[in-house]
Image (cartoon, coloured by chain):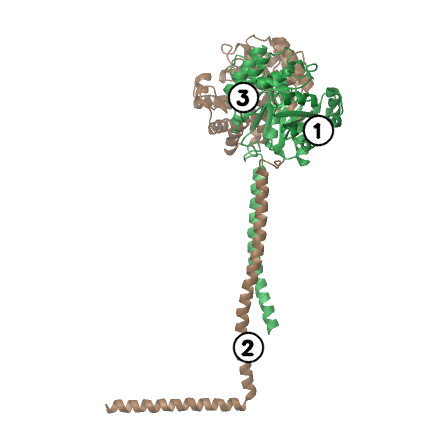
Chain colours: A green, B brown
Amino acid sequence: MWELVKSVAKHCAHNVLLAATADTEQKYQVGVSQSREQSAAAAAPISRPPVSLVSLPRRVRIVEVGPRDGLQNEKTIVPTPVKIEFINRLTRSGLKTVECTSFVSPKWVPQMADHSEVLKGIAKVPGVSYPVLVPNLKGLESALAAGVEEIAIFGAASESFSRKNINCSISESLARFGAVAQAAREKGVRVRGYVSCVVGCPYEGPIAPAAVARVTKTLLDMGCYEVSLGDTIGVGTPGTFRAMLQAVLDAHVPVHVLAVHCHDTYGQALANILTSLQMGVTVVDSAAAGLGGCPYARGASGNVSTEDLVYMLRGMGIETGVDLDLLLDAADYICAQIDRPTNSKVGRALCRKS
Amino acid sequence: MANLLQTTLCNVIMADDAVNHANNFVHQLVLFFSRHILITEYMIIMVCLIVMWELVKSVAKHCAHNVLLAAAADTEQKYQVGVSQSREQSAASAAPITRPPPPVSLPRRVRIVEVGPRDGLQNEKTVVPTQVKIEFINRLTRSGLKTVECTSFVSPKWVPQMADHSEVLKGITKVPGVSYPVLVPNLKGLESALAAGVEEIAIFGAASESFSRKNINCSIGESLARFGAVAQAAREKGVRVRGYVSCVVGCPYEGPIAPAAVARVTKTLLDMGCYEVSLGDTIGVGTPGTFAAMLQAVLDAHVPVHVLAVHCHDTYGQALANILTSLQMGVTVVDSAVAGLGGCPYARGASGNVSTEDLVYMLRGMGIETGVDLDLLLDAADYICAQIDRPTNSKVGRALCRKS
């Protein structure tokens, strides 16, 4: 009787269960397919909010490199007080990171010979960072003596570029910078890394994304808090930028430590920056007035202009903390001082004196 | 009383009889069962079976209930896990920080509509000789461009640069498979264009009431009615009609423009027979955010994406970013002008059209086909820049150290 009871119970339970499961299964499938439809609809390009509106940061930090990357391309030496006033005006516009000079040998970059005076002379605002480029331990020593709190070091993703630019291989340069980074960190100085030629090299042509990933990881391992990926000759397009960034992310580099440094040599900078934002990047380098040319393409433009970048981000509802009018004032100032028209389209459109 | 007593006695006697009968019955029954023990046993067994069956049913129900609960809970869990996995996937695809978004949808091919000879040159103060215009258009065609907007049949009183419209249209070397649209403002202009052998015209409406009134001295509604007649007359002659909408993001007089207004004008142009509508950011104030919102409104109004083109001015340097956004939304036709010809009458000194070279450079880098040879395009740019004595506005042109 007990066995009979058990088997009857199972039979009844099974039948009722089948019915209920079928019902729940149907609910499950409907639920999953609804979720899938929602996912598919979210990715469909035709009649749903586009990718450009989805996956965007709420806030972007702009790293202003005009005083260093911009001015170092100028043949005419800019007086120290002008550099100081330029940096002060940039700070007043709300920029939180202003790369102000480079502790390289004056023999190589005469424009940056007054590095210590500039760093000591600027009105340092609390909460604003003033990184300086440092090529070696000697440069670090001078920077420390001038009260530096953040330095920048760089590696190239292109072997040829490394050899031509600083006369050593990538790994030799990274070993050298490893010592600089360690010494800086022992003094409590933050270290930012740069990678040059992340998409193309003037000597080698296209650069393998995996090479960029390797150099990026090495810089992070030596203690850089952030690595800026630089399209040094501006040949990148949204396609190649996406592939390069994807390789870096696939190498388990977290996106929040990445910045992009896009040159506008071929007019692609803002499109590349938009692509980077869509991939989660939240730090972008730029130069007020689009200062700086391109030593590899005579007559070509250099850095993307901070004004054009701020205009785009503002139009997309992304916070930068930068006041565009004050930024334009800073651009006007430096353009008047170096007697050069602005490279910024926003500057030109707003009929600024520059 | 006696009757009552008699009745009662009868009842008592009857009851007593009944009890006796019952007793007899039971007695007989007991005698029966005691004589037929087997039947008794069977009946006891039947009773037990009935009781057991009831017991079985209730146990089964109880078991079934518990098992069902467990199984349902299990299936429900699977369901929830499945749904939450799907939701996670959806959420992950929208998460901005540590996960790359899904690969974006991009077209494989983009058709470029070259507007340099019309939108570009009409901004030049110095009148360009007819032969130069013809040579310029021919060079553009040789670069592989499939649509070259070559002139405008407006009154020479308004646009002196375009006074030679008929000569240009008749003089160019028309390559089979290449379209040479001309701008036509009214029926008179259409008449002249037809006489010159036009095969495609372009008409335009504005999304801004103020711009319409200031630009062509009538309301949007009036202008569209006028163009409706032009479109109908053109189509009766077998001439294709392309539509333009101006000020799709911002207006120099009104400021920001409501996306719904753009959608309305677009639909009206399509209803009157335009095969395509080009959405123009006339003063270049658009950014990826505002461009996406505008395009979304047009698509939400059930305008199919394949009939849309974008015409981005680069006044604030936003053109390529806006074009990229448009491509990500499915747009496959883009207007541009070689050498970035043309300024902006609303922002002195500002640049105008996005340059075709910079556009081709971007599309080529993204693996999107255009059919355009960049070198031949740069040659065409060099030619016109030398002729009008003006440096190129194209960054690609400047980077490649072209003579322009």
Secondary structure type for disc 2: helix
x then y, percent, for residue A174: 72, 27
Quadrant containing the N terminus of chain B in the rendered view: bottom left
Task: Give the Cα distance between marks 1 and 3.
Answer: 30 Å
Pick the front one: B282 or A200: A200
Q: Is residue A90 left or right of residue B178?
A: left
Q: Which residue is mark 1?
A: A178
Q: Nearer the viewer, mark 3 or mark 2?
A: 3
| Badge 1 and badge 3 in a common chain | yes
Pick the front one: B375 or A187: A187
Residue at the spot 41% in from the left edge and 90% down from the top edge: B21
Q: Nearer the viewer, mark 1 or mark 3?
A: 1
Disc number at residue B355?
Answer: none
Q: Are marks 3 and 2 in contact (CB under 8 Å)?
A: no
x then y, percent, for residue A218: 70, 31
The chain ID associated with circle 2 is B
